[in-house]
Amino acid sequence: MPETPKKSYYITTPIYYPSGNPHIGHCYTTVACDTIARLRRMQGFDVMFLTGTDEHGQKIEQKAAEAGVTPKEYVDEIVETFKSLWARMNIRYDRYIRTTDDYHIKTVQKIFRELYDRGYIYKGEYKGKYCTPCESFWTQSQLDENGCCPECHRPVAEAKEEAYFMKMSPFADRIEKLLTETDYLQPKTRVVELVNNFIKPGLEDLCVSRTSFTWGIPVDFDEGHVIYVWMDALSNYISALGYENDTYSDYDTFWPADLHMVAKDIMRFHAITWPAILMALDLPLPKHLAVHGWITFNGQKMSKSLGNVVDPFLLADRYGADAIRYHILREMALGADSSFSNEIMINRINSDLANGLGNLISRTVAMADKYFGSTLPSERESGALDSELAEMATGLKGKLEELLDKTQLNQILIEIFQVVSRANKYIDETTPWILGKDETKKARLATVLYHLLETIRIISIPLSTFMPETMPKVWEQIGAGEAETQYDTIGTFGVLPQNVTVHKGKILFPRIDVEKEIDELNQLILQSHPKEEPKEPEFTPQPLEPEIDIEQFGTVDLRVAKVVECEKVKKSKKLLRLQLDDGMGGRQVVSGIAPWYQPEDLIGKKIILVANLKPAKLCGVESCGMICASDMPNGDVKVIFPDDALPVGAKIR
Ligand code: MSP
């Protein structure tokens, strides 16, 4: 009989910016996709799981320049760290794409040209706001209340340059329908913000080339232009399959993708830009886009500049990759943020893994070992609670499949751990340690232990996709072989042989001493990730004035004076009027420092006065002298405040 071909399943993570080392926030999507890929493989799908790195753009160019290396040298090193993290986290991807790979570069150039030839890309001039860290263009109306980037809230810069644009309006209706009338976007609650913020106000044409930096894929028919990083990055999902290149030939098998998974900050690009590009190319659209929230720390998205990153290598070394995988997947409900704390993580490891699951396994195996010398007898005697436990365990399969289709991994774990709790309660209710003392109750005891082993077997199968390192150890302990750990056996109770043999093993999840551990961990985290101090901007001093002699300097009379009154000069945005005590009867000075100082910042402060400067009128207000100040590299002005011990009127020499 010819084998029926396997159904394909294509799942992708975003491709990561190698602009700094990865943190636990980066792990979420990759661990989630890895778990889904493992579940789908187990279900019999032919899976393609793609991840990779998005290596072009101005931010990388700048970081490399700061580090004194070429952009490629810079990314090469960080890409290795990403790959070693994925290995540490037991991520089993099928393909890794780097946007600096030759085949990808050629594919993106072909896509760009194709869109140009089809009339969807045209040349124009870009004027607008650009956020360098996010590599995103924004319109005025999209900026936040402070006129900053709506994603990262950092200042945006005016940008004006010759650029190519992609027409977006031809796709607006289809995109709106995709979002509102299909189950493309998960969770559906996010549709409203997309439609209201981007589609209803009218989809603006997308600027798809830049000329102000070079670290990007060149437009091959117009020198000086590099292709917009998002067009480059999004295309990875098809170039990695071999679309318009000969490096791979998996496009026909795997496109359209079954699931793109991303965090909320890049939803817009996957919900609007990517479908528009595909529509313009006349290609099928991906089936689902799952959008999750952020792992936050102290209420903010983890970020190196905030000094709140949590190092996944450090956590995996202390607790094992499985515990970390479990924790992040259990904590994050699709659509919501999840706040990371060492305390929550350790408590969860203790309660769910050490006390719940670990205890269930070690008690069951220890009792089978103690009362039956590790091999259960075949005699059985059923009891009241047996079928309830068995039904709950076998009922998992249907629930799991439904939740998996909705990408609700944390709910799958909740369901599984309800079975764990039920099984632990079953132990308390059936009291096997009492049955064990009575020779006439051995058949009943064997039934109880068999029910427990079967329950453990059933839950361990889906759990092996969340915790791939530990579950094979569980199988060893409960005596389950390959045939008894196949996906389809989740729905059947009684798969282990009646006289199964268990093997007592090591404790799978040791209990952690919470207080001691948190102290140690906080120390370690601080040591390994000191907050990044903002770098002093580069400053080039102005050229020196021509030399003067000491007599000439002596003609400038600099005095210490104290500000006694201060107010803004009416009708002027720049000027402050200061009334000074100069130790010589007082005087009024006008100074152009209003943009940087409020009057109350200065009242009572001592300053340095150029006391013999000819009086002048500024905005009609007389100024007798000048206050010493200096310029910051960013254009701000700082007043020079002398030592407060100096008396007013003291001469500076
Ligand atoms: N290069 C783009 C993606 C291009 S996909 C065609 C990018 N890279 S990124 O490295 O900045 O982020 C990759 C993913 O990690 C994004 O989904 C981002 O939201 C996610 N996360 C980064 N920090 C995160 C948390 N703290 N929590 C959860 N996800 C986080 O964006």
Image (cartoon, helix red, strand yellow):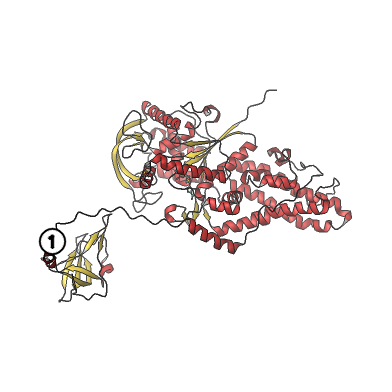
Q: Position of residue 189 (x, y in %)?
A: 50, 46
Residue 437, compared with residue 472, is above or below; it is: below
For the N terminus, the quadrant is top right
Q: In the rendered view, does 632 fall on the left or right side of 271?
A: left
Residue 476, compared with residue 652, is above or below; it is: above
Secondary structure under badge 1? loop
Q: Position of residue 71 (x, y in %)?
A: 39, 41
Pick whichever, 158 or 334, lies toward us: 158
The image shows a total of numbered marks equal to: 1
Q: Quadrant of residue 536?
A: bottom left
The residue carrying mark 1 is: 548
Instruction: Name the residue type under label 1.
Output: Ile
Residue found farthest to the top: 1
Q: Is residue 356 visible in the rendered structure shown here?
A: yes
Q: In the rendered view, does 627 fall on the left or right side of 281?
A: left
Please give the name of the residue rendered at 40% of the width and 50% of the height, measured from the top-left corner.
Answer: 152
Q: Position of residue 401 (x, y in %)?
A: 63, 41
